Amino acid sequence: MREIKFRAWSPNRNGFVSDCYPIGLKDKSGFRLCGVGEGEGCQDTEDDGLILEQFTGLKDKNGVEIYEGDIDSFDWIVCFEKGVFCLKQSLDARIFIPLCETDITEIIGNIHQHPHLLQ
């Protein structure tokens, strides 16, 4: 069974917030997260502009956990599309490859810290 984990990107902090988990939808605009940062308790994603990304349950050849928003060595983006984790050539691409049909050899970055990899 796949471990269910999340990470949250904070544009305001320009980094990932560690040790967070969603405790449910606050409303249609965002999740309510707990354990966001040291001693911060719970907060809402829309308050900080947090972007929630889920762990795929897979690791690359170096043992790096693969999350939504990661970029592989061929510059494909890990997404969740139509109920399945997949790879897409761009965020707006209509064609995707389900992760179960391919091997990700190496994660080289993510769409937040390395947007230049997508150009």
Image (cartoon, rainbow, N blue to C red):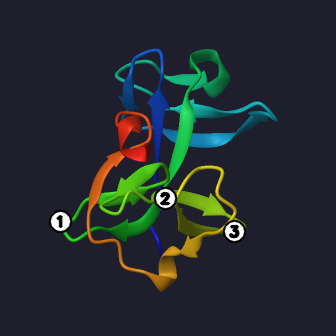
The answer for how far apart the CA atoms under marks 2 and 1 are is 17 Å
Q: Amino acid at mark 3?
A: Gly
In the rendered image, residue 107, in percent from the top left (x then y), is placed at: 29, 58
Estimate how packed mark 1 is, as few (under 14), some (14 to 19) or many (20 or more) residues with alpha carbons within 10 Å: few
Q: Residues within 10 Å of mark 3 (few under 14, many from 20)?
A: few
Distance from disc 2 to disc 3, alpha carbons, whole Å, reads 13 Å
Along the line of sight, the residue nearer the viewer: 57 or 35: 57
Question: Where in the figure is residue 69, as x and y percent of width and height?
Answer: 48, 48
Disc number lying in front (2 or 1): 2
Q: Residue at x 38, y 59 (%)?
A: 66
Instruction: Give the left or right position of residue 111, taking residue 97 as reference.
Output: left
Identify the residue position indicated by label 1 in the image: 62
Relative to 2, 15 lies left or right:
left
The residue that disc 2 covers is 78
User: CB of mark 2 within 8 Å of CB of mark 1?
Assistant: no
Most extreme residue toward the front is 119
Compare residues 11 and 21 and report the one nearer the observer.
11
In the displayed structure, 68 sits above or below 86; it is above
Q: What secondary structure is marked by label 2? A: strand
Identify the residue shown where x is 56% and y is 67%: 85
Q: Say few, some or many: other residues with alpha carbon within 10 Å of mark 2 (under 14 / 14 to 19 / 20 or more).
A: many
Q: Which amino acid type is shown beneath numbered disc 1?
A: Asn
The quadrant of the rendering that contains the C terminus is top left
Q: Position of residue 55 (x, y in %)?
A: 46, 57
Instruction: Name which of mark 2 and mark 1 comes first in the sequence.
Output: 1
**Residue positioned 65% across, 68% down in the render:** 95
Q: Is residue 103 above or below residue 80?
A: below
**Which residue is denoted by mark 3 in the rendering?**
83
